[in-house]
Image (cartoon, rainbow, N blue to C red):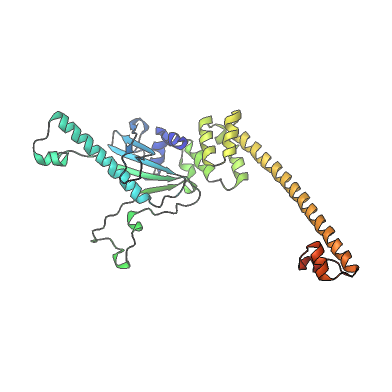
Amino acid sequence: MTGRMFFSDKERFAELLNLHLYHGEKVLLPENLIQRKREYPPLADGCGPKSRDILMEDTKRKVCYGVELETETDYSMPERIMVYDACEYERQIRAIGRKHLEEGTYVNFREKKSRIKVDDFLLPTVTVVLYLGEGHWEGKRRLVDMFHLPEYAADLSGSGICDYGFSLLEADFLRTEDHKTDLKEFFQAMQCRQDRERLKHLLCSDGFQRLDPETELVIAAHLNIRRLVRRMKKGEVPMCKAFEDLMQEERRNGRKEGIEKGIKKGKKEGKKAERLGIIGRMKKEGLEEAQIIRLTKCTKEEYAEAPGI
């Protein structure tokens, strides 16, 4: 939910799609965008309604843009996007049909059967997947890749098989310097998730000091460090300070854990030495191996390791 609100900001949304769909050209303008809430009915038994993460309508260019936010790979994504887009077109057709029925503008059975008239048009829908997980997307990006086609059918030209794909943006591999909004800091942080020291310096840099608390919480949530989010919410602590405190606490806990492990290891080695000493003394007193093993319940390896006569 946090990510949906963050990326639904019209300025961020326009910048993201302009950079990665239109090579930086200002095709989408924030003032022309209207967010649409969409929940589509289930298409199969046992499946609940399908909801889009974000859908914006460009009222000037008459195009709908959807963004799906994914933290894990979805192996069925090409089919899922196809269903979302098909449901959106079906919703538009139903809306046009209702309008014609209400206004009584159908002139023949063909129009009523089609639900739209020959001069009606739909708004095209462009759907983008923004992968916020670590590394590369591991799923397929085209519907045809989900089919097990023989080699002779790999070329779809003239095969009659229709394909469907989607645009994919991977947070770990976007050019952060191209962004002018706080998406720059968001993607910079995502790309430092595996390097705590680098992340610490980044969070304390000037760009991050200018972020508002809401943006900091979104970044912290997508870093997947729950203790960081809790610390920030509990004390209303800036992200940089909260992260430094968390790292110091982890170092202290690491040292404490190391000391405790050392103590446990020393005790264990001490008990082992004491046990081997007893076995050694029994050897010197001339007791047989079988008798020593029976009395001490030691292993043959321990018996061999104990000092002999």
Residue 222, given in percent of the width and then of the height, sits at 51, 40
Residue 13, given in percent of the width and then of the height, sits at 40, 37
Residue at x 73%, y 44% (from the top left corner): 256
Quarter-of-image position of residue 281: bottom right
Horizontally, residue 130 falls left or right of residue 302, namely left
Quarter-of-image position of residue 125: top left
Horizontally, residue 173 falls left or right of residue 198, namely left
> Can residue 163 be seen by looking at this rendering?
yes
Q: Is residue 30 above or below residue 259?
A: above
Q: Is residue 296 above or below residue 82?
A: below
Say which quadrant the C terminus sits in: bottom right
Say which quadrant the N terminus sits in: top left
Residue 275, given in percent of the width and then of the height, sits at 83, 59
Residue at x 82%, y 70% (from the top left corner): 289
Horizontally, residue 96 falls left or right of residue 209, namely left
Residue at x 84%, y 64% (from the top left corner): 279
Q: Nearer the viewer, residue 266 or 302?
A: 302
The furthest residue to the left: 108
The furthest residue to the right: 285
Tell how many labels: 0
> Can residue 212 be seen by looking at this rendering?
no
Residue 41, given in percent of the width and then of the height, sits at 31, 40
Q: Is residue 309 above or below residue 102?
A: below
